[in-house]
Amino acid sequence: MTANLAPLAPPAAIFLARHGLSDAKLEPLPADASPRSYCRLPGQGQLLMEDRTDPVGYAAFIRLARHLRGLGLSAPRVLGSDPAAGLALIEDFGTDTYGRLLASGHDEQALYALAIDALAHLHGHPDAADVSVPSYDMETLLEEVSRFSHWFVPEFAPDLDVAVFDARFRQMWASALTPLEMAPRTLVLRDFHIDNLMLLDGRSGVAACGLLDFQDGVIGAGEYDLASLLQDARRDLAPGLEEKMLDRYLHAVPNSCGTRGDILHRYHLMAAQRHTRLMGQFIRLMRRDHKPGYMKFMPRVAGQMQTALTAAGLTQISDFLDARLPGWRAAGEKLATLS
């Protein structure tokens, strides 16, 4: 699908003209869960990024793209920007996302090994956290698990008192997540999964892993991104691959990242917290944002949440859910039909 410059809003047309691209064709790229939009400029090696609704996120993208490149990782180069209009020209990494490559039969282990190496490089870099982004602190973590209370609970058990449920739920999670307060601080990209990773031709080492959609980056425990990659809501990994990749990561990161036991415990904690958030997030996307497509992942996420709760030793939370929300683990299949 291509479009001429004419349908563009005046700020975008002026912006492109300013960069000598008045006659460029535009190919809109599929939208995701964010308010940002992207158009490819065929033959130019560039994308037009537009986000007029989130100036903070826009600024963070520009800042983090430069920071990640400075760390030796492959974020898109920013070729031009207009913060007032929420527009930027960025390097086009092409179409070889991990999602597409895996769907076409590309070597799964090789792709995940490259992503793990990129994460280990980031987490082991002494300057990784030297960037101005928010802290992934306890209050933020608890606000995220409350998404389960405020969206999943009313959907699954509409007669339950959400305020009472959430107060107890947050109390238990606050205790469970205490070990994260002692975790080494690093840059957490937040959306480190197959749709935001690319294989880049002509680059070697960790630079061959292209990084996208990192503008929500925070400073916190790096195990969040590890769980985002290896316990993806979108797909199941081949049997044994998660364990192989965890081993690869543990051998690659420096001792400053913690002991094997500490890292694995934080990994399971972050996985449990992430899946809990997503159980509410996907319903919020459907009900509030009219984006039901993510509901098809609910069965997988429900199973991942229970597995992670067990692996992290969070039996109190698991027992609480079973008592207050009997059958919640099987809810994924039913809720998926709402998409």
Image: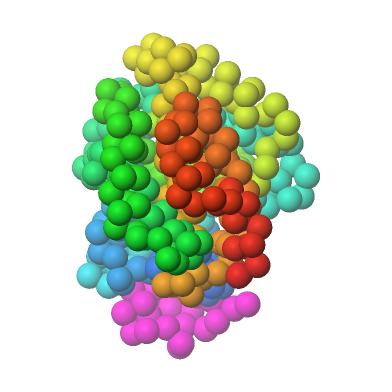
Residue 12 drawn in magenta: yes
Which contiguous range is marked in magenta?
1-25
Residue 192 shows up from this direction = no
- Percent coordinates x, y for residue 250 in the rendering: 50, 17
**Whether residue 260 is situated above or below residue 35 in the rendered picture:** above
- Percent coordinates x, y for residue 336 in the rendering: 63, 62
Main SS, magenta region, reads loop
Residue at the image position 25 percent from the left and 59 percent from the top: 56
Count of numbered circles in the view: 0
- Percent coordinates x, y for residue 20 in the rendering: 40, 71
Quadrant of residue 125 within the rendered picture: top left
- Percent coordinates x, y for residue 207 in the rendering: 51, 35
Quadrant of residue 238 within the rendered picture: top right
Q: Could you say which is closer to the camera, residue 182 or residue 93?
A: 182
**Whether residue 269 is situated above or below residue 126 in the rendered picture:** below
Q: Could you say which is closer to the camera, residue 317 or residue 139?
A: 317
For residue 55, side relative to residue 307 (left or right): left
Q: Could you say which is closer to the camera, residue 243 or residue 191?
A: 243
Residue at the image position 68 percent from the left and 52 percent from the top: 100
Residue 18 drawn in magenta: yes
Q: Quadrant of the N terminus?
A: bottom right
